[in-house]
Amino acid sequence: MILKIKNSYFDFPDIKITIIMPKNNLFIFLLLIPLFLSAQDSGLRKPLDIPLYLSGTFGELRSNHFHSGLDIKTQGREGLPVYAVDDGYVYRIKISRNGYGKALYIKHPSGLVSVYGHLKKFNERIQSYIKQKQYKKQSFEIEVFPYAIELPVKKGEIIAYSGNTGGSSGAHLHFEIRNIKEHPLNPMSYGITVEDTVRPVIRNAFAYPLDFHSHINLKNQRVKLNFKPVNDSVFIADTILANGKIGFGIESFDRQNDSYNRNGVYKIRMSVNGLPVYEHIMQEFSFYRSHYINTFIDYSYYKKYRRRIQKLWVEPYNLLQIYSLLIDDGMIEINNHNYYNIEIQVFDFNGNRTQLIVPVTGYSAKSFEPKKANPGAYHIKAHQNNSFQIGNWQVVFPEKAAYYDFDIEINSDKNELKIEDKAIPLHKSLQIKYPLNQIDKTLQAYAYIAKNGKKNKKYYIYSLKKNDTLTGYSKYFGNFSIAYDSVKPYIKPLNFKPKARLNNYRYLKFKIGDKHTGINKYNGYIDNEWILLEYDYKKGTLTYDFSDKKLQGNRHQLKIIVTDKMGNTREYSTYFYRNP
């Protein structure tokens, strides 16, 4: 008999065990089963011991990505205990100035991974482990992958404390569940639920002609629909006249009990005359494809109004895998003199539903001529590399930088490159190149490519000097120019005075910043030994914890070095007194 054992604690390979025994010893085998198959509780416990209220739901629409977990409110506070949702081990720790800030990744016996982001600090055992790694690497920002035996955890163990680190805009816990493919999964499917008896809201609805032979109310353009309530869950729109291939889009959100946050919805379904033709469910997605959100929404509407319409049809260049039902990609063919009843249903995870009914009457109209491109425009082909020389400037759209082909106007003068600011999303950054030999030699070291804002404001974009060329990378169109930064960053002590006695101080704090390109790196030293400085980029502060190491002697030399993205460096030096 072959018994396949799935390892239930550490990330070792599955084990095959061959058991040979007499038939009359079956009871011995039954006694051995618990030794091989550890009892597992499939339900996860809550990561916080407070009532759960959400400021963000799984799959919620964000800038250039879908939200990959739950944002759990922490009552406006930091420092709440965060608990392991199941047995497992810490397999990844990442600390960064943005993103998830201080984050823990725990692998569980089921193969799932739980993620805890924006943490203030870890528990003492994990904190000690990661600080040793930071001091060894001499870096605050770090990513490590501990061995399975190094940091095991038990379900319900305090693993960290909630915070506001990284790209967080307020104190909360970002919580995720991932599968073996590192795809984020909806944590609500694993027992992390909230009280919710509130129906989703359909804020706006739109109809779209999808080619130049189609119309909505005799217009070959997006049309906003007027609708009114039938009851608290059903709304009906004014009848529209249409012909040809059309699609629908809605702007919607969800709320939970006792919460006013406008969160993402779980599922949207559309039917035509009772036949389902479209459904997407926010249950699982791939990080790799998350940027295709720009094909999922009406990007031109978002760019103009900063609000997201979810398209209920699928473009051919949309590679998302969130769709559970598609007939003709959700596109609807409307024929003359026919009548159609479109039903759009929006659900939250708890099954609360809101429905919009759109009556459509088929009514033929003349075809509309497609708009002709400006003869001077450049044609961008999505599936090939596109390179254009415009004066001293070179503009490169790499292969698959765009989702689809389009035309765009590009002009330049000696000092500025003007790329038509069209409402077209980019999947990859375009490259803007300028020859260094066209820049004064005394200024080349300080030169970068900037995106021009209002009132001649210059915004740094990632710039690289290579092969006598200055190259900038941008995912957005607009006007660009060469800018210069020769100004050093600034460093200011916040909680102490130079040359003072600091016996009773727990921390040293500094304010740092840079007026042009931003902070690139920073280091600190006490008595010529590297110290760990925690960087909060939102506040622009560096913090040193005196408990990190015991100082020897009474008088101590302090040095802080900060460098901006152009290599300009500021050094701050002083001394202080502190008894061992």
Image (spheres, helix red, strand yellow):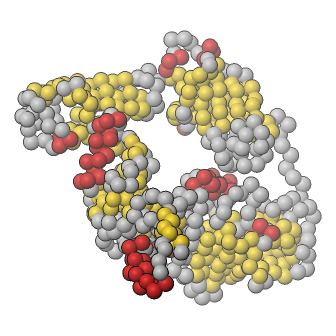
Task: Please give the name of the residue rendered at 42% of the width and 72% of the height, measured from the top-left corner.
Answer: 36
Residue 185 x %, y %:
53, 66
Quadrant in which the C terminus appears? top left
Q: Residue furthest bottom?
A: 231
- Residue at 38% in and 68% down: 86
Is residue 257 left or right of 534 when viewed as pictured?
Answer: right
Residue 162, percent from left and from top = 32, 59
Say if residue 266 shows up in the picture: yes
Q: Which picture quadrant has residue 293?
A: bottom right
- In the drawing, does residue 253 fall left or right of residue 389? left
Dividing the picture into quadrants, the one containing residue 215 is: bottom right
- Residue located farthest toward the top when viewing the structure as drawn: 441
19 or 407, which lies in front?
19
* Tag count: 0
Pinpoint residue 137: horizontal percent, then vertical percent: 35, 35
**In the rendered image, is residue 193 in sight?**
no
The residue that appears at 49% across and 74% down in the rendered structure is 20
The image quadrant of residue 533 is top left
For the point 50% across and 63% down, the residue is 14
Please give left or right for residue 222 compared with residue 289 in the image.
Answer: right
Image x and y of residue 538, in percent: 37, 45
Q: Is residue 495 left or right of residue 341?
A: left
Looking at the image, is 567 positioned above or below residue 182?
above
Q: Nearer the viewer, residue 360 or 28?
A: 28
- Asked if 65 appears above or below 452 in the picture, the reply is below
